[in-house]
């Protein structure tokens, strides 16, 4: 087998499997080129295959697996080895890999909660970039609910690295911002406010769970949750069930009245 072709065949594919087909009509021009190419030393490299040819075409299968397993750098390095027939397919695949790479870069751009000051506000929030969702937490040290929300946001930042999570001490970001409004969450997209949560009552106090906060943010569009329903609804349903079970029935009340 040509050294070039050998280097391209994935290690998971047996080399002997690539040598089972000696029927020329089963070979692409690319494979034929590899089989008859003269190397720099002038020696003609060629595969030696068994005399019988199966109906399947393992060479084509090997080639498809090979170029689909290449990185963008490997495609660039080996583009001189591609025949004209393969150029269109390779270019389409190259564009697909490039688009996937760009999407992955954007998707994994963040991943943590960053601290900002008032001077950073316009740059980090209003000019975050096209399509970027921003969640900003205004907080103050010593407020338990602010601490809890910062903990939840750290988890959500890792779960949704495509969303930009920020935090800022309230009076540093907005002078004279009242403590009664803390914690505060602002949600922005492309410079426009898409949601705001102001004050402890909005969050339901210290019973706020990370899933509940995720759901609230998903309603603004800031994250794409995999939760199927509002976690708070489950808690409310459980409370209602508990109340119904503990409340005396009308029949019991009637019986008590008869005894009287």
Image (cartoon, rainbow, N blue to C red):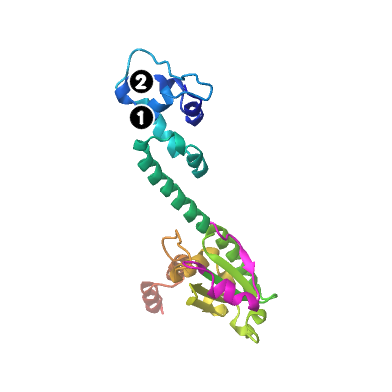
To which residue does mark 1 refer? 29
Distance from the alpha carbon under mark 1 to that under mark 2: 14 Å
* Residue shown at 43% from the left, 45% from the top: 94
Q: Nearer the viewer, residue 13 or 185?
A: 13
Q: Which residue is mark 2?
A: 21
Comparing labels 1 and 2, the label whose residue is closer to the camera: 1
Could you tell me which secondary element the residue under label 2 belongs to? loop
Q: Residues within 10 Å of mark 2 (few under 14, many from 20)?
A: many
Q: Residues within 10 Å of mark 1 (few under 14, many from 20)?
A: some
- Is residue 56 in sight in this rendering? no
Residue at left offset 49%, top offset 19%: 43
Q: Earlier in the sequence, mark 1 or mark 2?
A: 2
Q: Is residue 123 left or right of residue 253?
A: right
- Which region shows up in magenta? 108-133
Magenta segment: does it hold 78? no
Give the quarter of the figure containing the C terminus: bottom left
């Amino acid at each position: 087998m040509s050294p070039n072709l050998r280097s391209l065949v994935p290690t998971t594919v047996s080399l002997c499997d690539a040598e089972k087909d000696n029927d020329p009509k089963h070979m692409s021009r690319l494979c034929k080129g590899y089989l008859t190419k003269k190397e720099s030393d002038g020696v003609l490299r060629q595969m030696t295959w068994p005399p019988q040819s199966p109906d399947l075409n393992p060479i084509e299968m090997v080639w498809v697996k090979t170029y689909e397993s290449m990185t963008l750098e490997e495609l660039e390095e080996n583009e001189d080895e591609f025949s004209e027939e393969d150029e269109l397919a390779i270019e389409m695949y190259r564009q697909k890999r490039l688009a996937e790479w760009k999407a992955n870069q954007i998707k994994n751009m963040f991943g943590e909660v960053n601290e900002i000051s008032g001077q950073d506000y316009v740059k980090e929030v209003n000019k975050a970039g096209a399509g970027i969702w921003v969640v900003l937490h205004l907080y103050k040290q010593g407020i338990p609910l602010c601490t809890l929300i910062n903990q939840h946001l750290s988890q959500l930042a890792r779960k949704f690295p495509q969303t930009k999570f920020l935090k800022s001490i309230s009076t540093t970001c907005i002078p004279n911002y009242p403590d009664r409004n803390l914690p505060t969450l602002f949600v922005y997209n492309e410079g426009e406010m898409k949601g705001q949560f102001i004050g402890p009552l909005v969050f339901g106090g210290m019973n706020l769970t990370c899933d509940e906060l995720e759901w609230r943010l998903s309603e603004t569009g800031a994250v794409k949750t995999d939760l199927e329903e509002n976690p708070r609804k489950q808690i409310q349903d459980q409370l209602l069930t508990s109340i119904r079970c503990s409340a005396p029935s009308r029949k019991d009340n009637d019986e008590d009245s008869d005894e009287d």
